Image (spheres, helix red, strand yellow):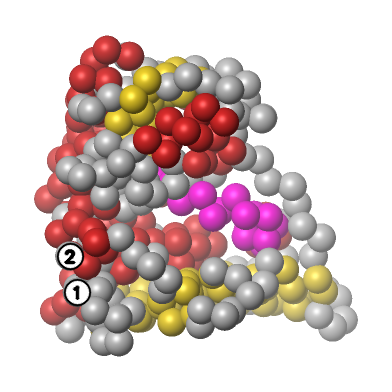
Amino acid sequence: MKVCIVGASGHGSFVFRAMEQDPSIKVVGVAPGSEGEDASKMAKMAEKQGQSAKLYDDYREMLDQEKPDVVAVNCFFGDHGKVNLEVLQRRIHLFAEKPLATELEELELLEKEYKAANVELAAMLGLRYLPAFYTAWHAVQDGAIGQVRLLTAQKSYRLGTRPDFFKDRKTYGGTIPWVGSHAIDWIYWFAGEEFVSVAAQHSAMYNNGLGDLEMSALCQFRFSNEVMGSANIDYLRPAKAPTHGDDRVRVAGTKGVIEVMDGKVTLINDQSEGIQELALLDAPAFFAEFAKQVRGEGKCLVSAKDSFEVTKACLLAREAADKQEIVYF
């Protein structure tokens, strides 16, 4: 399977992590997707995997010359929309960093092009494949907590050092679409319902001179069937914290509550006494699953529908925070 990588500003490493499970994956070309972006580190990652990926200056030339089966896009976030559109217009399978676009108009164009392209598409919502979240979701699917009614999710990061493009909304897109996309995806995924409305807040205060970058955000969603979910998002995790991120989910249902925290899954329900810690399931590599989907051999956990719906939810939540009003889907 021939793969090209556009950009080096997101999670293109998903491609390399899948190679052990799927040796057919070959990275044949790498190119920047944004002005001033250095894509050479992607070429170096390919080299470490024993592959020789040609480094291009222009991703369009690369796509036309290499004619890959799949393109992984992870450039500056504000350029996702235009690069993704170039890929879909060439009828190439798309594995794209989230959000798929940073403006609703771009997202609508992408969805229209996707429907015409007859290709596979997934956004890099790969934290579904972390063992704890993967295990918790399967437990919910198996009925461990009954009908899901209320969800809360957390995505907290150290601020650390951020590239200059994070300082400008046009190139960054906002903290809700970037960091918050994972938390919003978790509540959507676990809820199994459709988005109805969102109210949100965000603040760029105390961001260490990083321009437009929001340090904190809070989103409250209403889903179909009167299910409710919230996501709290921040860059406030202390520099001396033991890990870069602090990811959590709590899902309350009619027969129990399941929680993910510190990489562990705990369950309280009406079937067993006390708190149960669930044994973690082995999760497959995300891009290996997507490669199977491209070959018609299965389905990955992130569908094209999920990718578009979560992106739209992120952008509408950002709009709700900007306007200080409830936004309906």
Residue at image mark 2: 168
Location of residue 66 by image quarter = top left
Task: List x then y, in percent, for residue 285.
Answer: 61, 39
Looking at the image, the residue that sits furthest to the bottom is: 206
- Give the mark nearest the N terminus, 1 or 2: 2
Q: Amino acid at mark 1?
A: Gly
Residue 106 sits inside the magenta stretch: no
Q: Which residues are magenta?
A: 119-137
Residue at image mark 1: 211
In the rendered image, is residue 29 in sight? yes
Looking at the image, the residue that sits furthest to the right is: 273
Label 2: how many Cα within 10 Å (few below 14, some 14–19, many 20+): some
Note whether 152 is above or below 13 in the view shown: below
Task: List x then y, in percent, for residue 136.
Answer: 67, 62
Task: List x then y, in percent, for residue 230.
Answer: 43, 77
Left or right of 271? Residue 319 is: left
